[in-house]
Amino acid sequence: MKNIILYTGGTFDLFHSGHVNFLKHCKKISDKVVVSLNTDEFIERYKGKKPIISYDDRKIVLLACKYVDDVIENINGEDSKPSILSVSPNIIAVGDDWAKKDYYKQMNFTQKWLDENDITLIYIPYKEGISSSDIRKR
């Protein structure tokens, strides 16, 4: 039987039930879930503000989640391809809130690149009503 490796990436600041729900879905469809975690420097550059929780603490929380098998550093910031290739995933999963955005541009890859690397991109339902941004506003 083939070992299905799933790659997902993100910030995972203020870890909440939406994150857990997403990662649970990831684990249901794979044998191994690897999270590529954004560094504090990348988050500040990309979002214009520092994360509330440090990279090291976010990594500890993710590794404690029973749906996560490994956490790696998003080593190349805006260009996620090196991190993706370091994992050799069969699947890349992203929340379906990205379905109406240009996720390919965000990740700096193309469908051709995914096909050449035998990777399937899937969208997992996003849990409405909870987000790190919402928590910050409260």
Image (cartoon, rainbow, N blue to C red):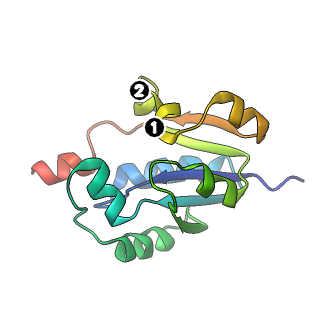
Within 10 Å of the Cα at label 1, are there few (<14), some (14-19), or many (20+) other Cα atoms? few
Q: Distance between the residues labelled 2 and 1?
A: 9 Å
In the depicted structure, whether residue 103 falls above or below residue 46? above
- 55 to the left or right of 123: left
Q: Where residue 107 sits in the image (x, y, percent)?
A: 51, 41
- 100 to the left or right of 80: left
Within 10 Å of the Cα at label 2, are there few (<14), some (14-19), or many (20+) other Cα atoms? few
* x 71%, y 51%: residue: 89
Residue pointed to by mark 2: 101
Q: Where residue 76 sits in the image (x, y, percent)?
A: 51, 57
Q: What element carries label 1?
A: helix
* x 35%, y 54%: residue: 17
Q: Where residue 113 sits in the image (x, y, percent)?
A: 69, 35
Which label belongs to residue 128? none
Q: Where residue 22 sits in the image (x, y, percent)?
A: 47, 47
Residues at marks 2 and 1 touching, judged by CB atoms closer than 8 Å: yes
- Residue at the extreme left of the image, as rendered: 138
- Residue at the extreme top of the image, as rendered: 100
- Residue at the extreme right of the image, as rendered: 1
Which label belongs to residue 106? 1
Residue 13 figure quarter: bottom left
Q: How many marks?
A: 2
Mark 1 residue type? Gln
* x 27%, y 45%: residue: 130
Q: Is mark 2 on a helix, strand or loop?
A: loop
Query: Quick one: label 2 or label 1, which is nearer the N terminus?
Result: 2
